[in-house]
Image (cartoon, rainbow, N blue to C red):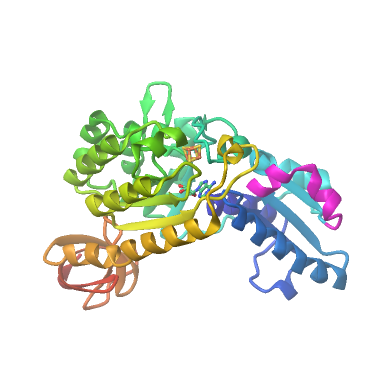
Amino acid sequence: MNEADSEEMFLHLSARGAVRTDTLEEADAVLINTCTVRDHAEHRAISFLGRLMKWKRQDPRRIIIFAGCAAQRLGNQLKKRYPFLNIVCGAKEIENFANTLDKSGLFAPAGAAATPAPGLLAYATIMRGCNFNCTYCIVPSVRGPVKCLPVQDILQDVTRKAQAGAKEIMLLGQTVNAYEDGATSFADLLNRVSEIPGVERVRFTSPHPIYFTPQFLQAVKDNPKIARHVHLPVQSGSSKVLREMKRGYTRELFLEKVEALQEHGFTISTDIIVGFPTETEEDFQETLSLVEKAHFFAAYCFKYSPRQGTPAAQMQLLPQNVLEKRLDILLNQVRGLSEQAYQRQVGTQQDVLMEEPTKGRTSGNFWVKTSRAFAVGNMVRCEIEKAEGTLLFARNEHD
Ligand code: 5AD
Ligand code: SF4
């Protein structure tokens, strides 16, 4: 989501004459788009700001923009603590970024944005914010409640991107499958986006387990353009911890959803938090056993990080060494999951969307190396001959 927000902000900068550079010394302005989901993310942004202080001292005309979720959380404190910041733009104000730039008087008036070609893969934000209140999570307070974009706007946005060459569209939202606009459900939207000329594949992230209903699966079942991979955060394998996290599902329900998705050909990756304040050794064992059962494609594991203002931040923390030990054990268990998932693909037939002349991705999100070159953007049918690490090797390809 941050990447998509950065792109959106960049479009407004580009309409005011800015061009992108990767070299700090060349830049006149720096935009830092921040995350605050864990303390570590926020620290990284702030320490980068420390580095930029020296950069700005070399030439006081240089501009620093601090945007996103950490900007939202820290708000007015930021300009007091870092008076050299030119613009602070919180996550809730990203939609008004153009106005913020104009009000600052630091940029030329807007002309036509030099719309960069989106490339083969393009993002489309379909909703902002979150209506859940998971007790560890700061997102609802920095991003606010759900606002779904009107379906017509989304279809227009995707059409424009497809006309500019995008073939794979990633629909984005904090609980993306809760999307609705009047009579249009998330499944309807997926089907309508996939009908747009030029669109070959549609992905989405991140869904919430409770919205994967049988009706949803029925609606997408016959649409091969919907990518067969979902990132479905579980957070914990213990029903007790899930209740205390207010996730809205039990271990059993999550496993049921996983099974139903896998029956429909989906591969599943997940997020897991270890060391939630009430997590006992038994609860942690339940997480390990869920990982064993679910056959995830990948699992991203995090130590619990207390976030100011969230209900869980009031609870007694577990000792850091317990968090570290559990993370270590879990990381050991999830290591190798992707390799196993890659091995399970051997012998299957796959459609590979070529991202490089001899490399592309399957619907299930596996990387494939082809035995000969194809045009980038082609969909190539192939047989998977073998897997090495996290790369599949194809044969008998044809487009
Ligand atoms: N501590 C640790 N991890 C967290 N996440 C969200 N909030 C916290 C927190 N307070 C993780 C969740 C989420 C991912 C984006 O970040 O696993 O899915
Ligand atoms: Fe945070 Fe829960 Fe909303 Fe995800 S669903 S953003 S974890 S509150």
Q: Position of residue 363 (x, y in %)?
A: 27, 55
Q: Position of residue 139 (x, y in %)?
A: 56, 40
* Position of 58 relative to 177 (above/below): below
Q: Is residue 279 left or right of residue 286?
A: right
Frontmost residue, 23 versus 279: 279
The residue positioned 56% from the left and 50% from the top of the image is: 305
Using the rendered view, name the quadrant where residue 346 is placed.
Answer: bottom left
Q: How many marks?
A: 0
Answer whether residue 360 is visible to the viewer in this image: yes
Q: Which residues are magenta?
A: 68-84
Q: Residue furthest top?
A: 182
The residue positioned 60% from the left and 52% from the top of the image is: 35
The residue positioned 39% from the left and 31% from the top of the image is: 248
Answer whether residue 28 is visible to the viewer in this image: no
Q: Is residue 110 left or right of residue 345?
A: right
Residue 234 in magenta? no
Frontmost residue, 349 versus 99: 349
Residue 75 in magenta? yes
The residue positioned 44% from the left and 37% from the top of the image is: 175
* Position of 335 relative to 295 (above/below): below
Secondary structure of the magenta portion, mostly? helix
Q: Position of residue 98 (x, y in %)?
A: 71, 44
Q: Position of residue 374 (x, y in %)?
A: 27, 72
Q: Is residue 69 left or right of residue 174?
A: right
Frontmost residue, 100 versus 131: 131
Using the rendered view, name the quadrant where residue 251 is placed.
Answer: top left
* Position of 61 relative to 266 (above/below): below
